[in-house]
Image (cartoon, rainbow, N blue to C red):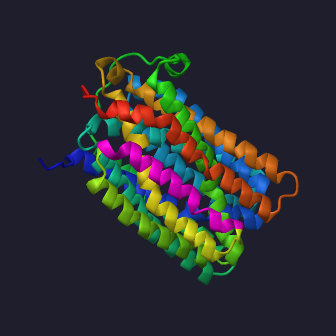
Amino acid sequence: MKITLGRQSILLLGVNGLFALAGALSGTFLNVFLWKSRPDYAMLGWFTLSQQLAIGLTFWLAGKWVKEHNKMSALRLGTALSGIFYMIVLWAGSKAVDWIWPLGMLLGCSLGLFWIAFNVVYFEITDRENRDLFNGWVGLLGSMTGIIGPWFSGLIITRMTDNTGYRLIFTVSLVIYVIAVVFSFFLKKRKVSGTYRWSEPWIQLSKRDSPWRTLGLGLFAQGAREGVFAFLIALLVYLATAQEYKLGQFSLITSAVALVSYWAAGKWFKPQYRSKGMFIGALILLVVLLPLLWKVTYGTLLIMGIGSAVAMPLYVLPMISAGFDMMGTSGENVEKRVELVVLRELCLMLGRLCGLAIFIVTVLNAPSLRMLTWLIIVLGASPLIGWIFMRKLLNRTEGQEPSA
């Protein structure tokens, strides 16, 4: 039987694609822009940490609105706040580094609102049969925007003097966010039911035999890597080359590889392969970091980037799909889907905060490139820890039949 996506799924992919494109255009260079204003690793660490705190808190607080009121308004507000963030950065210019915490919190709130609404709607319009296909398309669109956005931005920034290029790119992102808000109005308003249970994530995580506790540990391990890698790798590419264009080129190449790997994963990666695929992906994610121990250059970073692009779908898709499949194993879980989406994000947030705390402590004491390299290796091993937590859960969920 051919697996397909419905009209609402395709429309949701379109909104996600626009959101990803705007982020790819500006997000890739945002930390470089801040670094050029103030070369300070700790400053970037605090900026990212403030984002993660805001994302987690927004998921938890906005969960009530998403479950009991209108989740579409949360998605639109998140998109609009992303545009407002770049408006403020445009206004502040190089003085944005003086407002790291409020800016990080604003960006985190925008991301939190968008993603809690997106994840809940995604669960409602997909099922176990087409969920991997949808996830593959999300990765595919993310890779396509990663090819176009950073390369175009790097080219523009390099060819323009001072910060003119940055201002232009931030303006383009603002316009795309506005377009994404318009597109979101074509998504149907989803039904709401039930009362939001504030303590549900903690109740699930406190149960020793709860599969959500196992998933939470796996997500924590995933987050420990994500929190630091999300900004540090791009910064290292810039520091190794001193050219925004090279960073755009790096993103173009790695995103092109990711495009193919996500397409292949969406087409052939079936639920019965999740555990083995996740292990292989985690192992590759660690191995491709080892050349950095020899020397941190554009070449070794590119090896790492290409290898990670190949392996990431193998690791991430089982983690995502297994969690959402668990939401559909009973009517009770379906009813608590908003709280369970919040649980997922809180576990990721705690992992990211842990990784960022380790990073900040490391860089506060006159960091060397060698020290940062070892930090990358240590955090890069966390996906293997995530697989250890997830393997039994993956084997268990593969045999379950969802009710929704």
At horizontal 58% and vertical 37% (from top left) the residue drawn is 220
- Closer to us: 386 or 352: 386
The image shows residue 262, relative to residue 105, as above or below, that is: below
| Residue at position x 40%, y 47% in the image | 276
- Provide residue 148's location: percent of width, then percent of height: 44, 71
Q: Specify whether residue 284 is painted magenta.
A: yes
Q: In this picture, is 74 found above or below 197?
A: below
In depth, the one of 276 and 94 nearer the eye is: 276
Magenta span dominant secondary structure: helix
Task: Decide: is 40 above or below 117.
Answer: below
Q: Position of residue 33 (x, y in %)?
A: 68, 65
Q: Nearer the viewer, residue 87 or 291?
A: 291
Q: Which residues are magenta?
A: 272-293
Identify which residue, 50 or 214, lies in the foreground: 214
What is the quadrant of the C terminus in the image?
Answer: top left
Residue 118 seen in the figure: no
Q: Is residue 62 left or right of residue 229?
A: left
- 383 vs 1, left or right, is right
- Residue that protrudes farthest toward the left in the picture: 1
Instruction: Please check the rendered image and state whether residue 164 is part of the magenta-colored stretch, yes or no.
Output: no
Q: What residue is drawn where x is 73% and y is 57%?
A: 374
Give the image location of residue 307, x and y in percent.
Answer: 50, 64
Residue at the image position 36 percent from the left and 28 percent from the top: 327
